[in-house]
Amino acid sequence: MYAFNYHRPSSIAEAVKLLKASSDGRCLAGGMSLIPTMKHRLASAADLIDLNGIRELAFIRREGDALVIGALARHVEIADSADVKKSIPALAALAASVGDPQVRNRGTFCGSLCFADPAADCPAGLVGLNGTVITDKRRIAADKFFNGLYETTLEKGEIVTGVSFPIPEKAGWAKFANLASRFAIAAVMVAKTGGGVRVAVTGAKASVFRVPEMEAALAKNFSAAALDGIKISPDGMNNDLHGDPDYRAHLVSVMAKRAVQAATA
Amino acid sequence: MANAKISLTINGRAVSAEVDTRTLLVHFIREHVKLTGTHVGCDTTQCGACTVHVNGTRIKSCTMFACQLEGAQVTTIEGLAKGKQLHPMQEAFREHHGLQCGYCTPGMVMSAIGIAERYKGKALTEDIVRHELEGNLCRCTGYHNIVRAVIAGAKAMSAG
């Protein structure tokens, strides 16, 4: 691992100041992606800014018509939260499917968004549920947050403080996990809201993506049968030892149907 | 190289040290505090052999920096027995032979206690235990007896 200076601020303002002052600073929340990557020297930071001392980031709450999750909310807390289970059970199901119990005890939803791993679950949750990323200075719509493999549109010195979700009429989560890593080979979040239907896929391409043909079919008829006959192109799908593009394209259809079934169960 | 000063409690004992910021908690426990019951079985946060409790929560000690642990309460496998009297979960692993080579066992036991505490007062089924053990790998594949041990140990913990 490359050397780094460690900082533990106790407020968002202090964290922003530290991040801006560093030539190469990174924020640490749960660390379940960042630390293993640093161990392998695939990531490094001159300054590591540990957000775990900022208690105001550790919350899950309903705010009017929205569910808001702070940057320090752990996966286990989201999976167990009565507010989440009541308002967006599919989000609780997603959180319960991340990694393993020890990883869920540390890892955070917002940290996973910032890391933007192509096989992570949380990006599909953000995009499928049409969430909004809240930073120290602005709000970023789900469709504007990811920028390809491991890339986001966050600016230098910007810190994600939470994520806000509108409450959908129905939503469902289905995941086909790699049994060793528990990352998604393909996973789908489907949501039906007043503003339409959204289908977001993770694990299958370099970054999370939506499937407009499925969204249009489900807008007319929100049932798994509505997806029959919609062929997903293998173009641009990941090709690795876990599955080739044809396999993944097929898996996206299967997972999308299961997600709709979960939403309508 | 950058250092950090930390003071924490491990198995009830106060520990203070100055460590390289890169020092992982598992290496701090093994190499600085010389408690070698906590094991390292992989370098990818998958195997769970390094599982310890931090402030009462089971975590993988290979995926936290020691410098993050200022003021924390850490429990390792060595902190469970009272003298010669094994913790009920350790006793259940012994009774049900919940181990083969034993390498994964410290992490399994720490996870098992986490499971028992999480499901305290609820029925602990084999399905739940197998699901909750997803973060601990046994490469001897001795899961059958491990699962039996976890269920028996959880029962003994709630009775005790």
Image (cartoon, rainbow, N blue to C red):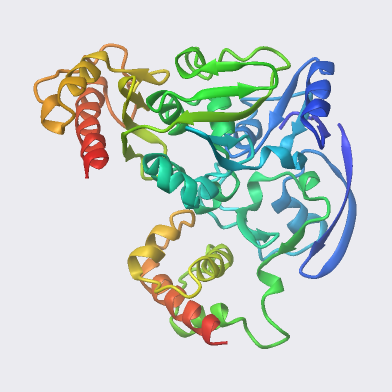
Instruction: Farthest residue to the front: give it.
Output: A64
Residue B34 image-quadrant placement: bottom right
Residue drawn where x is 56% and y is 78% of the image: B90
From this view, report whether residue B50 is shown above or below residue A32.
Answer: below
Q: Is residue B7 above or below residue B160?
A: above
Asked whether, in this view, residue A220 is left or right of residue A19, the answer is: left
Q: Closer to the camera, A232 or B83?
A: A232
Q: Nearer the viewer, residue A223 or A237?
A: A223
* Residue A263 percent location from the top left of the image: 26, 39
At a point 84% along the width and 17% down the height, the residue shown is A21
**Residue B130 seen anywhere in this rendered image of the structure:** yes
Could you tell me residue A75's position as x and y percent?
A: 52, 44
Total numbered labels: 0
Side of A6 where B118 appears, left or right: left
Picture quadrant where residue A31 is located: top right
What residue lies at 54% left-to-right and 49% top-to-bottom?
A77
Residue A212: horizontal and vertical position, in percent? 26, 14
Frontmost residue, A132 versus B93:
A132
Percent across and percent down for residue A56 are 72, 39
Q: Check the image and report above or below for A162 versus B151.
A: above
* Residue beneath the point at 12% across and 26% down: A226
Instruction: Give the quadrant of the N terminus of chain A.
Output: top right
Whether residue A100 is visible here, answered yes or no, is no
Q: Quadrant of residue B129 in the image?
A: bottom left
The quarter of the rendered structure image containing the C terminus of chain A is top left
Image height check: is B138 above or below A178?
below
